[in-house]
Every structure is written in C-alpha cells, then in structure tokens.
Amino acid sequence: MSAQRPRTGPARIQPARRIAYEVLRAVHESDAYANLLLPAKLAEAQLSEADAGLATELSYGTLRRQGYYDRVLSLVTGRPLVKLDPEVLDALRLGAHQLLGMRVAAHAAVDESVALVAANGKRSATGFVNGVLRTLTRSTPEEWRERAMAGLAGDQLLASEESHPLWIVEAFREALDADGRSGELRDLLEADNLAPRVSLVALPGLSTPEQVGELGSVSPIAARSAGGDPASNPVVASGRARVQDEGSQLAALALSRARPIRAGESWLDLCSGPGGKAAVLAAEAAIGGATLLANEVIPARAQLVRNALAAFADPPEVVVNDGRAVASSGELFDRILLDAPCTGLGALRRRPEARWRKQPSDLEELGLLQAELLDAAVSVMAPDGLLAYVTCSPHRAETRDAIAGVLARHPTLVALDTPAVLAGIATHSLDLGPGLHAQLWPHRHGTDAMFIQLLIRPAAPL
Ligand SMILES: C[S@@+](CC[C@H](N)C(=O)[O-])C[C@H]1O[C@@H](n2cnc3c(N)ncnc32)[C@H](O)[C@@H]1O
C-alpha cells in the first residue's frame, strides 16, 4: 500500500458524513448511545429526509459492521488497529463502510474521509487515510471478503463475516438449537445487521391500528410507520399511539389477554421504564376495569413512564422503588409483568454499537438480579395470579435457565403454555419452537428476540 498525498485540496464535508463521524467519535470516545445521539443531532441540523437517512445508514451501518471492517482494515494497514489514532480509525471505518457496504462513489468516500481527518486535527494522517481507502477501491467488496475470511471456519467465520463477537454467535447458536432452529444462525446474524422497520402500537381504547397506518405483521394492535419521523403522525403526536416493536406488544398482550380480565384486578409492572409495555397494559387495564401500578428503580426512567402514560384520562400510578423490595408494601397482584433488566442481545439491530460493548461477564450480575426480581414478583402474586417473565434476549442464562431456577425455588409455581396463549393473540401463526415459553426472532418474526414465559400460582393444585 502506498501512502500517497491526496491530489486535490480538502473536500467539502457533507453534513450527513460529518454527523455520522461525530456519532462514531462520541460512541468510541465517551460511550454515547448512537440511537439516542443521532436523532438529537439530526433534529439540530434539520437535515432533509434523504440526508437524515444517509447519516443514519453511515453511522449505524459502520457501527454494526465495525468488526468486519476492522478485520479488512488491519489487512490493508498491516498493523494492529489499536496503534492508530482513534480519530483516524473512525474515519477509516466510515470510509470502509461506504466502499464495501454501501458502494457509494469512491471519490466521495475517500476524499471526505480524508477531509474529516484533516478537520479533526489529524492533518498529518491524511496521506495515510487516502492511501488505505484507495487500496480498498482497487479490489471488489467480494474480493476483500474472501481475503479477510481466509483461514477462518465455523462460528469464527460467521462471527467475522457477519460482524458479531464470537461469544454472542455461540450464545445464539445454542439458543437457536434449543428452539429447534439449527441452521438459522446466519439468517439471524444477517437480520441483526439490517435496520428494523419502525413499528407503531395503537393503544387499545385510545386508537386503532387503522387510524395509525398500515396494519402490522404479527401483533393485532400494531401499525407500520409510513417512513420519516413517526412523531409527525398525528395519532403518535397525541400519545394515543407509540413507537414499539411488535414483539414487545405481544409480550404485554400475553399477560393482559392470557385470560379474561375480572373488574377490580390489580396489576403490577415491576420494571417499567421507559414505559412502552406499561402503556399497553394501562390501555388493556382501563378497558377491563383493572388497576395498574408501574414501578421503576431509576427516577429519570420513572419519569419516562409517566410521560408514556400521560395520554390516559386517569393515568396509572408510577412509583420509584427497587423491585426486589416490592413485598414490603404487603399488596398482592393478579397480574405482574417482569420485563427484566437483561443484556438486550435480542435487540442488537436497534442498538448498533451494543454488540461490541456487552461482555459475557455481564450475565453473572444480571442473572442474580433477574433471580431476585423473579423471587420478589412471585412473593406478591395473588392466588391464581399470573406472572409474565420477559427478556429482550434469547441467551439461555437469562431465559430458560432463569425460568428453571424460579420453578425449582417455588414448587407451587406452574409454567403456562405461552405459545398457546400467543396463538390466540397473534394475527398470524408464529411457528414457535418447542416448550412452554415463547421465543421470538428477528429473522423469523421481524421482531426483537423477545422471550416470554407466563407463570401461574394456582390457588389450588391444577
Ligand atoms: C427491559 S427494561 C423494561 C422495559 C419496559 N418494560 C418497556 O417496555 O418500556 C428494564 C427496566 O428495569 C429497570 N430496573 C433495573 N433494576 C431494577 C430493579 N432492581 N427494580 C426495578 N426496576 C429495575 C431498569 O432501569 C429498566 O428501566
């Protein structure tokens, strides 16, 4: 590779590329969340819809495929990437995504990456960046793929090619195998690398899916966003509909529609922030004459729950408590949602940098918290009460193991046939795997990989 000087003067940097670069820098420099930072930057810059779409693809696509691009870039540079200045590495990643993942015009991808480095205090590295990216342009993306994957096999090959950490690939393989879906691993990894369609929920009693947009695909209360900013939809703007993954909708409905609601029932959402499922439960509770209490341990997130419930004429109470201490109130509940804090491995397509931040060691602490929250929830189940344990992760430790653990610790608790309950709710057959739990998958259902298990505490032996 030759480190030639760029031939022309500095290129003008398109706002979409500048914003995408700023997002990458903030993610890597200060642990920012791209899905929170980018919308704020887009709103501030008032980009056109097309430019906003470009900035989104540039930033999210680069972050999702970072592992793959890093492998190609280390081939080209012939040196460990940790030795590069972070400002230079992010410009190279952004350029690589345009050249290998988006196929934008080579001169724009190269010249603007060079200009970004120059504009960010690394003028001395412009020749290097220009040389590396020009080298990328001299072979096709397929040729680079072949070179980068040479010598790899099995899950290591899949992990590199589909840009996921190996431990996540292995965890997904195990979860898919247990769900009777061996052979679907690549489909799942590919789905994680695609931008999800924005889905909306029409809150029952406040709006209908028909008023919101086109109908959704699996949830009976879902609608599809017509594109652009969902907040520009008047039903969303009024709080009667919200952005929500269809898997999350089904998780809330599994609890509220598992059996008819008796007026006067008392419901608890134990870990409710930021309030997506609480809004669905509040809507269902209002229709059935039940009362919902929403709990959340982080005050700022509890405020988000209050905001999510503000559209209701008589909004449910939101309290700030550690869910593990819920028994201290002495109250019992007929239905409880425990949407547990988890690794979020089921929503990697929404949080583009998340896969690189999660660590297998996260599972230990979360596993303990999930077990303690489960025990707390069980302790406040009324006789014949229902509990929905939900995670946005298919990892065995957070799903089947957590359920096996709570059933072993509470022998009177019974697992309900959750796929059978969902079969009566979903608008299409979900073709769920074996077992009493429901595991949804992005590549199969177009939803996040939600895990749902309904449990009952029978008043008398079943
Ligand atoms: C997966 S999120 C819940 C998402 C929510 N159900 C929704 O649909 O918007 C888990 C929530 O649990 C909260 N949490 C974590 N530890 C908790 C605890 N000990 N007690 C109560 N809430 C907790 C987190 O702050 C987070 O808001």
Image (cartoon, rainbow, N blue to C red):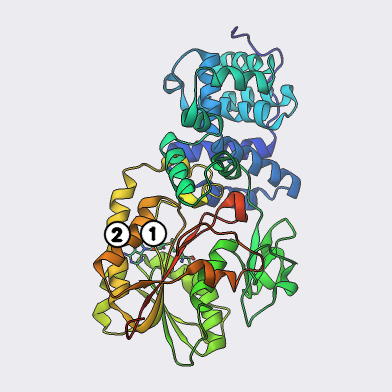
Q: Is residue 259 visible?
A: yes
Disc 1: which residue:
341
Which residue lies under the disc numbered 2? 369
Q: Is residue 123 visible?
A: no
Left or right? Give the position of 90 relative to 235: left
Q: Nearer the viewer, residue 292 or 178?
A: 178
Residue 437 vs 3, above or below: the answer is: below
Quarter of the figure that contains the C terminus: bottom left
Dot 1 amino acid type: Pro
Give the vertical position of 88 relative to 281 (above or below).
Answer: above
Q: Are marks 2 and 1 in contact (CB under 8 Å)?
A: yes
Instruction: Give ligand 1's quarter of the image.
Output: bottom left
Mark 1 element type: loop
- Residue 35 on image: x %, y %: 55, 50
What residue sits 63% from the left and 75% below the top?
A: 240
152, above or below 390, in the image: above
The N terminus lies in quadrant:
top right
**Residue 410 drawn at (x, y percent):** 26, 71
The amino acid type found where label 2 is placed reads Leu
The x and y percentages for residue 406 are: 30, 65
Q: Kindly tell me whether mark 1's CB lies below 8 Å from ligand 1.
A: yes
Q: Quadrant of residue 361?
A: top left
In this view, the residue farthest toward the top is 2
